[in-house]
């Protein structure tokens, strides 16, 4: 099967622009729905007359839209149920906390309050700043390494594709106001690794083909041939990870949905950006440099 992805690069750039512009606008206008790991929250320590399961408590909390809260069984348990339950959720006022307790008591019966406590953020602003700084340093190291192994155009094209994927994921979470917690960071790093791996696989074929293709072949032909040689492997990898992450999203429970969604969106975007954006950027850059060098040689010979 002959792939001509790079031939339609103007379409890919247009599609990416149509996705990224609303994502960026949403991030500036709506911001993000930071979870309790970033903002702190409220702990409700409850005691029941009978053993209850985490699933039962989560179902009752849906009345107050708190089903994504962290729910833990404490004290004596039989692995699946227990009489003591600790609920950690976003900051609640006294009135909201009493309303939640009333709904839990009504839904499960006999709820006694052991304590209501406000807690600070697990991930502070300083830790967040350090994480962002470390990410930027990692990006610089990746560009340096790929530039050494391949060329600087490939390194910057790969980082541009990864940035595209991060913006898409952040835009989706901003637009739909999905909660961002500590697991989000782990999922984002997984997406970055996947996207980088996909781009490196394709550009490794590009590097090999630079030595074996005919000198008369354009960079567009070379890139399309490289994609053709690696697309089967890319599709197998994408299908496998989407099957696993899709299962986690649909059947893994409420607490893993956002974690899995980051990877679902990120993996799809990563496969797309590696095949369509990174290679197209490289071809456009190489063509531009070729025209510029040709123009300089023409001026020198004139």
Image (tube, rainbow, N blue to C red):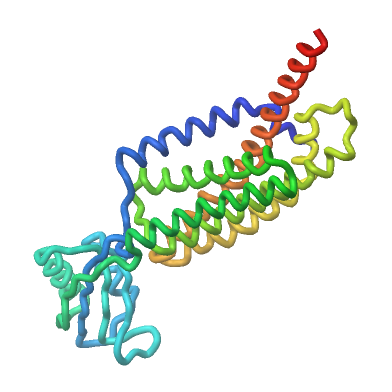
**Extreme residue in the top direction:** 302
- Front in this rendered view, residue 234 or 39: 39
Location of residue 115 with respect to 158 vertically, above or below: below
Between residues 242 and 55, which one lies in front from this camera angle?
242
Q: Does 183 sit above or below residue 261?
A: below
Q: Which quadrant would the N terminus be assigned to in this image? A: top right
The residue depicted at 64 percent of the width and 28 percent of the height is 9
**x, y (%) of residue 270?**
59, 47
Residue drawn at x 28%, y 73% as measured from the top left: 57
Q: Is residue 231 visible?
A: no
Identify the image quadrant of residue 109.
Answer: bottom left
> Is residue 232 in view?
yes
Taking depth in this image into account, of 18 and 61 the one nearest to the observer is 18
Q: Residue 92, how many percent across, how many down?
A: 17, 64
User: Which residue is depicted at the point 48% across and 59% down?
Assistant: 260
Expressed as whole percent of the image width and height from the top left, the position of residue 7 reads 70, 27
Above or below: residue 30 compared with residue 240? above
Quadrant into which the C terminus falls = top right
Q: Position of residue 254 (x, y in %)?
A: 39, 64
Q: Horizontal placement of 97 versus 165: left or right?
A: left
């Amino acid at each position: 099967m002959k792939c001509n992805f790079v031939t339609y690069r103007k379409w890919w750039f247009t599609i990416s622009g149509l996705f990224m512009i609303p994502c960026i606008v949403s991030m500036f206008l709506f911001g993000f729905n930071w979870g309790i790991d970033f903002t702190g929250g409220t702990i409700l320590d409850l005691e029941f007359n009978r053993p209850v399961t985490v699933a039962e408590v989560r179902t009752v909390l849906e009345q107050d839209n708190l089903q994504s809260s962290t729910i833990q069984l404490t004290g004596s348990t039989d692995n699946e149920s227990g009489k003591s339950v600790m609920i950690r959720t976003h900051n609640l006022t006294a009135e909201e906390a009493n309303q939640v307790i009333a709904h839990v008591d009504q839904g499960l019966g006999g709820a006694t309050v052991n304590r209501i406590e406000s807690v600070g953020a697990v991930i502070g602003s300083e830790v967040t700043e350090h994480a962002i700084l470390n990410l930027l340093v990692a990006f610089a190291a990746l560009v340096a390494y790929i530039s050494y192994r391949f060329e600087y155009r490939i390194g910057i094209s790969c980082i541009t594709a990864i940035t595209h994927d991060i913006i898409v994921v952040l835009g989706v979470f901003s637009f739909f106001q999905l909660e961002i917690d500590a697991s989000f960071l782990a999922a984002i790093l997984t997406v970055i690794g996947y996207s980088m791996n996909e781009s490196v696989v394709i550009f490794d074929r590009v590097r090999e083909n630079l030595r074996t293709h005919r000198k008369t072949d354009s960079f567009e032909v070379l890139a399309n041939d490289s994609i053709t040689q690696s697309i089967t492997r890319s599709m197998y990898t994408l299908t496998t990870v989407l099957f696993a992450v899709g299962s986690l999203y649909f059947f893994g429970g409420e607490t893993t949905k956002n974690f899995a969604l980051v990877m679902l969106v990120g993996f799809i975007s990563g496969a797309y950006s590696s095949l369509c954006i990174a290679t197209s950027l490289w071809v456009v850059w190489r063509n531009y440099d070729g025209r510029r060098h040709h123009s300089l040689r023409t001026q020198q010979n004139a």
